[in-house]
Amino acid sequence: MKLLVVTQKVDYNDAVLGFFHRWLEEFAKHCDQITVICLGQGQYGLPNNVRVLSLGKENGQSRLKYLFNFYKYLWQERKNYDTVFVHMNQEYVLLAGWWWRLSGQRIWFWRNHPQGNLGTRLAALLANRLFCTSSQSFTARFKKTEIMPAGIDTDFFKRDDLIEKTPNSILFLSRISPIKKPEILIEALALLPKDFDFKVSFVGDCLPKDQKYYNNLKQRVETLSLVDKVSFLPAVPNRETVRLYNQYELFINLTPTGSFDKTILEAMACGSLVVVSNKSFGHLREINSNLVCEEGDRFSLKESIFNLQKLDQGEKEKIGKKLNCFVEENHSLKKMAERLLGGNNK
């Protein structure tokens, strides 16, 4: 199989998209040849059967130049692939889907987002196969869609017994933006009893457009007298997050239903307890009811945090092992790649 992959970025140091480097490494085991077209590239070290072609964002190219490079690569590499895998960005399917269809190349489109538009519908129409990880995703409505494992590298994200989890520690690791709802966590912390011992770290950067929002979060922490218990730390490369997951007892993610934030599963794979508000993870209530709180509800979140942190160490470790097994059995990268590429005759 000769695969063309179209994605945003190839850079194992990227805080958000660094995981895709491991995807490419796993895909390479199933393909004779992989050609990657990415908007921008950073540092990478991929197998010999993987080639990376950048549209030039790392060099500050213009949008017109991106478009020129994109079509140049499509023509240049036209005989080097038989299947196209577009990751997340529907624009590429809209720009080239007609060409791929006329050329007889299969189009596989992975998109996992609760919102969609006419462009999403057109991209879905052009694609031969659609993939998402959440039944709440916009693309889940199409008959050609397959619900997939999230693709967590469980050989990398796993419990490290040499790293001791800090008691009553809480991690919120994400790009800091309104969609991630960090303000709900801050408000929930203020509701905890004054003598309740905890330390919280918000790890992540914000986009320039969200700088005021980020500053307001810090101000709110000061107003609520939480400065001694809450820290704001810069983003770290995805490959370094495994250390953080192993250090913190509890991971909080408040992304709305419809998305399927991989960080939740990465934390679970490392044996961390989690609290999420995403209804796609509602089945976690079967392990412990406090692992899922109500969306946008600071009181519900406060109860989950309080009840989980009050458990004895043995019970915390028992839940952590169950969460680790859940990821291994349902969302491993190996299983995802096998499902995706093992059915390459479709």
Image (cartoon, helix red, strand yellow):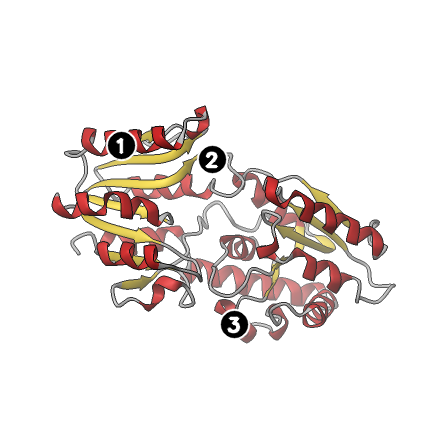
Q: Observer-nearest residue: 290 or 167?
A: 290
For label 3, count other residues whose C-alpha is less than 10 Å away and answer few (under 14), some (14-19) or many (20+): some
Q: Secondary structure at mark 2?
A: loop
Residue 95 coordinates in the image, percent (x, y)? 27, 43
- Work out how far the residue at label 2 is from the one at label 3, CA to CA, in angstroms: 31 Å
Furthest residue in direction top, as rendered:
59
- Work out how far the residue at label 1 is from the one at label 2, CA to CA, in angstroms: 18 Å
For label 2, count other residues whose C-alpha is less than 10 Å away and answer few (under 14), some (14-19) or many (20+): many
Mark 2 or mark 3: which comes first in sequence? 2
Q: What type is the residue that disc 2 sits on?
A: Tyr
Residue 15 coordinates in the image, percent (x, y)? 54, 40
Q: What residue lies at 70% left-to-right and 63% top-to-bottom? A: 313
- According to the picture, the residue beneath numbered tag 3 turns out to be 282
For label 1, count other residues whose C-alpha is less than 10 Å away and answer few (under 14), some (14-19) or many (20+): some
Disc number placed over residue 12 in the picture, else none: 2
Disc number placed over residue 49 in the picture, else none: 1
Q: How many marks?
A: 3
Q: Secondary structure at mark 3?
A: helix
- Work out how far the residue at label 3 is from the one at label 1, CA to CA, in angstroms: 40 Å
Mark 1 or mark 2: which comes first in sequence? 2
- Which is closer to the viewer, label 3 or label 1? 3
